[in-house]
Image (spheres, grey):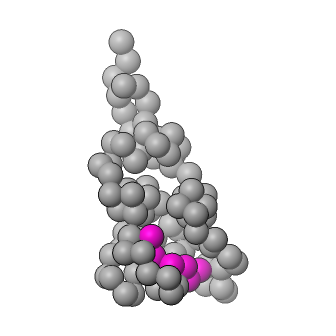
Amino acid sequence: MSESQFRRDRVPPVADVLALLSIDAGKPNGSGYVQVRCPIHGESNPSLSVHIERGNWRCFACGEAGGDALELYRRARGIPFTQAARELGAWEGR
């Protein structure tokens, strides 16, 4: 019987997570950021700033912020950490 565990190295890049959330990231500006619509509060204007290489993000409309793609996915879908990790393929075991 294997023990369940989170595998951070299996969390997809933030650009892939944005695609899973049906958000077109476009091309980053010179500092690596893109401005996209926030999937957390559903606004249609681009208020979410995402650093494509580092994965950190912040919405300037609703104030949500985080440090990685998994947290963005989790909050956008309103699901627990373990479920988000499983859906993104970053959870081993049961």
Image quadrant containing the C terminus: top left
Q: Residue at x 33, y 82 (%)?
A: 62
Q: Does residue 85 appear left or right of residue 46 in this picture? A: left
Image quadrant containing the N terminus: top left
In the displayed structure, 91 sits above or below 69; it is above
Tally of numbered tags: 0
Give the extent of the magenta segment: 33-39
Tell me residue 84's x, y (percent): 40, 47
The residue at the far right in this view is: 27
Tell me residue 56's x, y (percent): 45, 70
Residue 13 visible in this rendered orientation of the protein: no
Q: Residue at x 37, y 87 (%)?
A: 61
In the displayed structure, 3 sits above or below 62; it is above
Q: Residue at x 42, y 75 (%)?
A: 42
Q: Does residue 5 appear left or right of residue 33 in this picture? A: left
In the displayed structure, 53 sits above or below 32; it is above
Question: In the image, is residue 91 part of the stretch drawn in magenta?
Answer: no
Residue 81 visible in this rendered orientation of the protein: yes
